[in-house]
Image (cartoon, coloured by chain):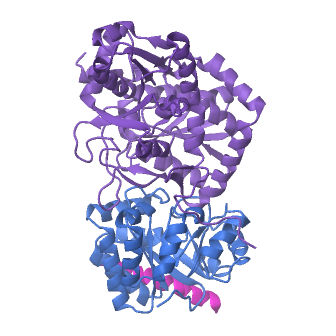
Chain colours: A blue, B purple
Amino acid sequence: MAIHFDHKPGLVIYLTAGDPSLEATRSIALEAIDAGADVIELGVPFSDPLADGPVIQRASERALSRGTRLKDVLRLAHEIRAARPVAGLVIFSYFNPILRYGLARFAEDAAAAGADGVLVTDIIVEEADEYLAEMKRVGLAPIFLAAPTSPDERLEAIASHSRGFVYAISRTGITGKQQNLTADAAAVVARIRRWTTLPVAVGFGISNAEHVAQVAEFADAAVIGSAIVELIERSTPEASPGEVARFIKGLHLHQAELAR
Amino acid sequence: MASVINPASPSESRPGRFGIYGGRYVPETLMAALVELEHEYEAAKNDAAFQAELAGLLKDYAGRPTPLYFARRLSEQLGGARIYLKREDLLHTGAHKINNALGQALLAKRMGKQRIIAETGAGQHGVATATVCALLGLECVIYMGEVDMERQELNVLRMRLLGAEVRGVASGSRTLKDAISEAMRDWVTNVRTTYYLLGSALGAHPYPTMVRDFHRVISREMKQQILEKEGRLPTAIIACVGGGSNAIGAFYEFIPDREVRLIGVEAGGRGTALGEHAARFRGGVPGVLQGTYSYVLQDEDGQIALTHSVSAGLDYASIGPEHAALHDSGRAEYVSQDDQAALDAVVKLARTEGILPALESAHAVAECLRIAPTMAPHDILAVNLSGRGDKDMGILARELKL
């Protein structure tokens, strides 16, 4: 169990844990892995998700209204790990729920649950001293975000402190759909590669097979979040695992077609 | 070669940290803009032309210096300390917020940014921002929670008249916290072209320092004025604390004067349970909200709590990080006054001095009403009257059955 992308582009699938229920997230995650997801990002719902667009905001509200807590997300991670030993597993959170849980306790429990890495949306390298020490202590990969606006000296720091992969944000903005990938995405990935040999995943606004194919041209993996979360929102809890699996297979199918 | 950017511990002393509080907890996309802002602000601080332009506008446009008024009738009726009111309510647009709005708008202009966004709670910061944008010919978008738009409707109309676009925020508690989140979402999207004119001593570095610096003029004037009038420093200074911009402005120059008590007044709301008030030092726990590490009202899972106050400007789950440091060091004291006490204080000040305070500032007046009678006749109590109450007439009409 480690983060690895066997084919290109790899697929990182974000799910808001507890939306619409923890059981549903578990089923969706397992189906997503079986359909070809290399890494599952389990999102910890937060009351004030300022980096997220309306789709993930609504998902967080639904998950919180069902009483989803960080300890539930860690238990869910443990269940997914037990059922699928090989897939990559990342805990994705805002910082405050982790601080309240206790940074050291969180690191220990996330590692014990079988997570491979952690991504904290509102942690930047300069503030990450204690966080990095805890991640290192328990052997979890800290994954930092890299932005199109990050100058080279920031990308160097981000690349040198990240483990597992580097998450490149495709454009300035919050999570959510977009029509076309901007030139920003390829440019930031090319700049990151000057500083690291880690895989680079591209996220924010990746919502269909065409986007995934575009990402394949310059990055190692595509992160799909809001498109999947919206699919779950429109579907029933019973039908959503199947729908998510079909959606993910569709992304790969398109890949195969392009390859021919 | 070592990287120029290195991880640091929260306890490490550096710009933007107040003790262990403050810092920068933001999405990476905003970091370049925050660093640019920090550098531009440092340059502007040492630029005589910038400072002269700001001083000129503060004097001739905003109306500084504001008077330090001896409230004779109130002092006599309470029968204790001599009470002075720092009349920030007399400033153009009706509150201290214009000090910071002018400073930051000039900075935005200097940086070549044509589009300004801001959040507002009570609407005073929104009005101040809309005003300076009109003055400087800048595009202006104001985010405001829908609950606040309803209870501060007059300010919504003022902003629109001034040419600003007011965008209602329907997420979360639909108050100040949600307006800040929405403004940050706009900023993260339009960061290359847009200046975020944050209205309180909150958020990521350099905002808490910069906003405080633009309001330092309050305590600088107060110190000079009280020395002229009384020949000595005040016994205590009282200010209301939402994010904490008027309070830090009123406290700052007195921090080295250990004999001067600094008293911040939080919103006690309508009860002591979580969700019924906005008293961060009475139930808050250190945490991260909207870019800074400070006391935050939150549940045991780290989810941000709902808050309540009759005053929109104090209705916020966190507090400026410098106040958190002043609290922990004991240099400032923080108390709370509830909704009813604030309403009573509005009536009392209106009918003894003919001054109608904003509901926010009325929390400071309420604390003054409580402690002045317990003080000696030679004691001096200075209350920062941060804003005027015209904006609250709808709430006052309903609550006081006028």
For the point 45% across and 39% down, the residue is B243
Asked if the stretch drawn in magenta spans residue B145, the answer is no
Position in image of residue B34 (x %, y %):
63, 51
Q: Is residue A114 visible?
A: yes
Relative vertical location of residue B108 with respect to residue A253 in this rendering, above or below: above
Position in image of residue A109 (x %, y %):
36, 78
Position in image of residue A32 (x %, y %):
41, 84
Asked if the stretch drawn in magenta spans residue A258, the answer is yes
For the point 36% across and 80% down, the residue is A77
Q: Quadrant where the C terminus of chain A lies?
A: bottom right
The residue closer to the viewer here, B187 or A118, is: A118
Q: Is residue A118 visible?
A: no
Q: Quadrant of residue B225?
A: top right
- Look at the image and give the residue range highlighted in magenta: A239-260
Relative vertical location of residue B392 with respect to residue B201 in this rendering, above or below: above
Position in image of residue B291 (x %, y %):
51, 53
Q: Does the magenta stretch mainly form a helix, a strand or a loop?
A: helix
